Amino acid sequence: MAGIYIHIPYCKHACSYCNFHFSTQTDSSAKMIQAMENEIALQKHFFSKNTKLDSIYFGGGTPSFIDLNYIVKLLKTIYDNYEINEQAEITLEANPDDLTLEYLQDLKQYTPINRLSIGIQSFNYTDLKFMQRVHNATQAKQCILDAQQIGFDITCDLIYGTPTLSNADWKKNIDTLIQLNIKHFSCYALTVEEKTILHHQIQTKKVEAIDEEKIAEQFTILQDTIAQNGYEQYEISNFCKDKKYAVHNTNYWKNKPYLGIGPSAHSYNGQNRFWNISNNNLYIKQLLQNELAQSCEHLNNIDHYNEYTLTNLRTIWGVDSQYIETKFGTELRKYFEFEIKPFIDNNWVNLNKTTYTLTNKGKLFCDLITEQVFWIDEQETNL
């Protein structure tokens, strides 16, 4: 199992909370696509021999913002250089205001894309305005209905914890997705990242600080609502019906290799991590000279252990202490079991044979638990 992530570094508009790498200036887009095509070809041997891709994911940025012909070109280059499973999940991130009926029809006709990740964020006008989103609730609902009619699989994003979102309106947001028969969606707590509009607004007292108690309340409302409607919380922020797990993201959590294309994109080959330069002009310059614009970090045994616990504690598959023993050694297995025991005692973690998973209450404290079981270099332990 392996996947390709394509980072489209352009957006129509900057949302207040977003710190992803993007530009609202698209005059370099033609050269950017050529550079990305070059990177795809240069990396054709990134995966081991006979590897077939089971996911292709266009993220950003806003992939639906650029000319569809660019998406077609990138897909052709991928298919020319890699083996793709016939049932591969091929996802395009999109904003509701881009998903006109005509665009959706063209997407279906001219590309193999079969899944849309729609950035709804909220169906509440005040909330959308606070986040500086361009679309409205009517557009959001209509694009979902049109996409379903045309035959796309759909996942949607929602954000909770904003100062403008009441608990009642948050429940309405979740209920709206359920009523629209969305089989997969993701929900993220609002976070304040440096160098964002939101960070500046809070620093200058134009917006109130994030209320952690409110976030916890809305996370609990989310868990209760999805459980009552037959959804599975298979990862802290991801929910589905009928085992409709996201192939691409699940590969991340299960430590499968992936290749990142485009400025700021990350890659992982099972041993090392790579990341591309987060500068559009420099990325274009190097790739048009057929030179990769990336840095590399070799991961040691401790790094692999930390990443395994970080990703797997977030999922229903959990952390297997026997796997830690086999892959990382006895000392790390003993360390993990020692550090996680208090969380079992206070009912934040379940233990089934050798597998550790978070309880619903424990999911509220996932970051705290993960931090505790991390191994920090040169630390002393009390095993």
Image (cartoon, rainbow, N blue to C red):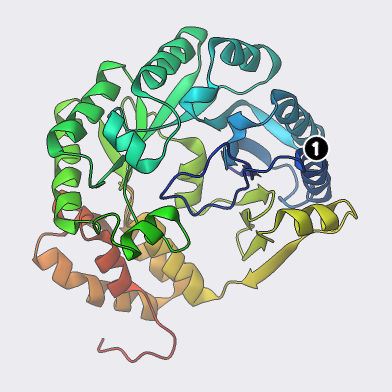
Describe residue 179's horizontal placement relative to residue 282 as left or right: left
Report the residue at 35% width, 64% height from top.
322
Residue type marked 1: Ala
Question: Most extreme residue toward the right, as rendered?
Answer: 289
Image height of 201 relative to 50, above or below: below
Q: Position of residue 287 (x, y in %)?
A: 83, 53
Total count of labels: 1
Q: Position of residue 380 (x, y in %)?
A: 33, 92
Does the image show residue 108?
yes
- Front residue of 273/1: it is 273
- Front residue of 383/117: it is 117
Instruction: Name the residue that disc number 1 marks.
Output: 30
- Front residue of 284/49: it is 284
Query: Residue 220 occupies which quadrant of the picture?
Result: top left
Q: Position of residue 105 (x, y in %)?
A: 60, 10
Does the image show residue 350?
no
Report the residue at 63% width, 71% height from top.
297
Which structural element holds mark 1?
Answer: helix
Quadrant where the image shows the N terminus: top right
Question: Most extreme residue toward the top, as rendered?
Answer: 149
Report the residue at 60% width, 37% height from top.
58
